[in-house]
Amino acid sequence: MDATFAQDDLNAVIRQHSEWLAAQLHAQRESLFPPDAAKTMRKFTSGEAAGLLGVNDSYLRKLHLDGKGPSPELSRGNRRLYSATDVQALRVMLEKTARKPGDYLPGRRVGDPLQVIGVMNFKGGSGKTTTSAHLAQRLALKGYRVLGIDLDPQASFTALHGVQPEFDLAEGGTLYDAIRYDDPAPIRDVIRRTYIPNLDLIPGNLELMEFEHDTPRALSQGNAGLFFFRVKEALQQVEAEYDVVVIDCPPQLGFLTMSALSAATGVLVTIHPEMLDVMSMSQFLRMTADLMDVIAQSGADMKHDWMRYLLTRYEPTDAPQNRIVAFLRTMYGENVMNAPMLKSTAISDAGLTKQTLYEVERSAFTRATYDRAIESLNAVNDEIAQIIQHTWGRP
């Protein structure tokens, strides 16, 4: 293609490039997930299934030999393989004979509030979407009922879960439908089941930007009301159906992010430990505080159960990063999570096929590379699960 074009043709060229890219991504999805271009979750080895359930592999083998629970698939090497549905069925079965409630189904009990986690930063490359997707999937695989919401118009969280915005959301289907000012739809209309038990999705696309455009207009006409309650009020419609909501917030402090902040009970700020990123975060925190003051003055309760900083794309052998990490831990103390998310080629390679590390086969990587990455992710996500449990008043 001739790379030169008249200035008047720029819009046409950009549109054409967008259409070409969307078509190629659609073709890639159909080649990766035939025959219906739908993603499925991989099977887990008996050791992985036992780890998710918190039991020994030998105990899982005994259940199989005793004919209790779902029958696993047997590989050619006579290895037991469990689907995510099998793991969930085992959870339900084991919970019935558990020594104490919540050993296998760790979600809410009577009186426990819904946990809404806003994952945010307004600098690209901080690992926000990677964090959100792996957190939502890990919590679902551990037995929590999870709703993942993509509030980022770029919709990477959506694409990771097998929905291509350009093709699958041509007629809407994002949270915008439920928070718009004119004739909002019930939030259930935009919730999709995913291929992972316990994990539902509200996808995103560029339509979410309409909320950023509509809100100033509605405010000028006196029709916006308390606009920052839009997300919270929509979630109240399905509050009893979930334990945790994970919101992948947009990378800017606009009206969507303000509404997500008002709905959140916990805030997770991703930080890449490089000086430019820390400088950017300083401005992000200042602007966030100013916006929260404005919202609070309008009558909103901006108290949150917790806030944590998560170190992402961390390289332990990088001396400058270590100095910044030490600086952050000294300054913010326990607000910095103990577990960092390590930088790993395994995570980025999985993303090439629009998958998380929980979805790809271990055999796709060297053992050391995969184990190092998965241990880091699990440590991060399980620490957040502990924070959730603590919020519910459990040890």
Image (cartoon, grey):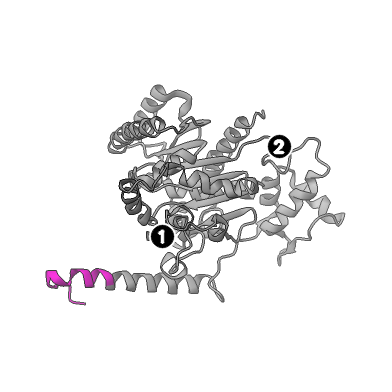
Q: Residues within 10 Å of mark 2 (few under 14, many from 20)?
A: few
Residue ID for mark 1: 205
Residue 231, horizontal then vertical, whole percent: 48, 46
Residue type at mark 2: give it. Answer: Val
Residue 129, horizontal then vertical, whole percent: 44, 50
Q: Residue at x 45, y 64 (%)?
A: 172
Seen from this angle, which residue lies furthest right? 66
Magenta-colored span: 1-15
Question: Picture quarter containing residue 169?
Answer: bottom left
Q: Residue at x 71, y 65 (%)?
A: 75
First along the sequence among labels 2 and 1: 2
Out of 307 and 86, give the one closest to the viewer: 307
Seen from this angle, which residue lies furthest front? 222
Secondary structure mainly formed by the magenta segment: helix
Q: Residues within 10 Å of mark 1 (few under 14, many from 20)?
A: many
Can residue 374 be seen here? The reply is no
Out of 391 and 326, give the one closest to the viewer: 391
Q: Secondary structure at mark 2?
A: loop
Q: Residue at x 56, y 75 (%)?
A: 36
Q: Nearer the viewer, mark 2 or mark 1?
A: 2
Q: How far apart, in angstroms, are the residues tagged by discs 2 and 1?
A: 35 Å
Q: Is residue 12 magenta?
A: yes
Say the numbered circle drawn on residue 264.
none
Can residue 12 be seen here? The reply is yes
Q: Is residue 59 above or below residue 393?
A: below
Q: Secondary structure at mark 1?
A: loop
Residue ID for mark 2: 110
Residue 65, horizontal then vertical, whole percent: 85, 55
Q: Quadrant of the C terminus?
A: top right
Residue type at mark 1: give it. Answer: Asn
Q: Residue at x 67, y 40 (%)?
A: 108
Seen from this angle, which residue lies furthest left? 6
